[in-house]
Amino acid sequence: MLDLERYTRRSGEWLLLDAASLQELYFSDKAEMPELEAGSHPHHVRQWLLASSLFPAKWINRLFSVGGIKWLDEGLGLLAFPATDTAKDKAYRHLVSRAASQSFLVPGVLYEDDYCLVLNKPAGMPVHAAYEGHAGTLDEAACRHMLAKHDPLPVRHIHRLDDDTSGPVLFAKNDLAQWKLDEAMRAKEIERIYVAALQGLLKRDKGTVDAPIGKDRHHAARRRVTPSGDAALTAYERIGQLDGLTIVRLRLETGRTHQIRVHMSHIGHPLVGDTLYGGSSRLLGHQALHGERLIFPHPLTGRIVDVQSPWPDWLKRLSGETRP
C-alpha cells in the first residue's frame, strides 16, 4: 500500500501533492499518460488522478467541477480542506447563535489529525440533534472544538452511539474523509468494542448471540428479537463478576439499533440501568454500556488506527475496577 502521507501535506485549504514523485511511481512506464508539470491543464491533472486511483473518483470529479484542482506556487493542490460557512452549516449555526459566554461541555479528544477527529462521548449526551435548535450534542461539541482551533472544517459523525452510551465517536473533517470512512462502515471495516455491566452471573466464559432484531410493534422506542427481523450477531466475553453483576466485553458483527441491549436482555441478563429492556436503575440511572475501543482504517493512508477510551467512573465503580 502506498503511504500517501509521504507525498502529501496540508497547506491551509489545500492538499499539496508531490506530483513528480507520484508520477514516477505510477506512470514511469505508461507513455500514454500526459506528463504532469507546473501549469498542466486541470483536465489532464484530473485524468492523471483518476488513472492513479489515489483518491475516490467521485471526489476528484467534484473538485474539478468547482475549480478545486490547481497548480499553486507550492505544487499541485487539491481543495481538500475548505472551511464551512458557519452561518449555513446546521451544527455551527446553532452554536454561534448562542451567547459566547454560555457554558458548554467539550468531551475529551481521543484522536485527531487533519482528516479525523475522535471524541470521547459521555453518557447522557446525544450525538446529534433530535429537533431543530436542540443544544448540547456531540456534533455541536465537535464544531466548538474546531472553532477553538480557528479551523471550521465541516465535521460530520461517521457512526452514532445511544444517548446514554459512552465512548469514542468518529468524525470526518472533510469530504474525502467522509466518503472513505462511510465506505469503510459499509464494508464493515470499522470495529467497535464495548464493555457492559450485566445483571446476574453469566455461567459461560464466552459466547455468541445470533438472533435477528426487528421493531417492537407494541413500543415505538424498543427493538426485539423476532424471526422477521434483520440478522444480528453479538460476541461476548466475561471479564469479571461481583455482587451479582457480570462485566463483559462485546464485539458486534452487525450494527442493529440497540443490538447489545436487546441481545443481552434476550439471554436473561439485561444491562444494569437499562429499564427499557428489563434492567434495574437501582445502581445506575442509564444503561451500563461503554465503547472501549474504536478501530478504523485511516482515510488517507489506509493504516489501522486503534483508539481506546478510558473506563468512566461509573463503570469502574460497578466493576470494582476489574481489568483483565
Image: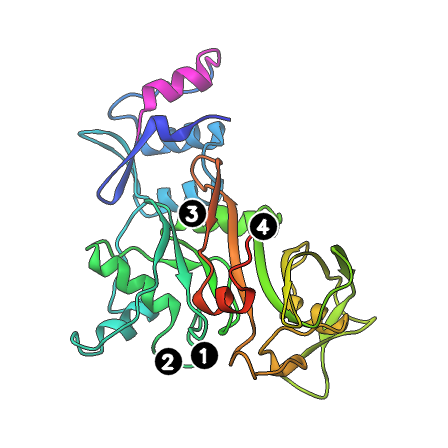
Residue 63 in the image, given as x and y percentages of width and height = 36, 44
Q: State the residue position of label 3.
A: 177
Q: Position of residue 284 (x, y in %)?
A: 52, 78
- From the image, tell me which residue sits under label 2: 134
Q: Are marks 1 and 3 in contact (CB under 8 Å)?
A: no
Extreme residue in the bottom direction: 218
Tags 4 and 1 in contact by the CB under 8 Å rule? Answer: no
Mark 1, secondary structure of its residue: loop
Question: Which residue lies under the disc numbered 4?
Answer: 324
Q: Which mark is residue 108?
A: none
- The amino acid type of the residue labelled 2 equals His
Q: CA distance from mark 3 to mark 4?
A: 34 Å
Of badges 3 and 4, nearer the viewer stands 4
- Location of residue 54 in the rendering, given as x and y in whole percent from the top left corner: 46, 32
Q: Residue at x 19, y 55 (%)?
A: 150
Q: Distance from label 4 to label 1 (Cα)? A: 38 Å
CA neighbours of label 1 inside 10 A, class few (<14), some (14 to 19), many (20+): few
Could you tell whether 319 is left or right of 241 in the image?
left
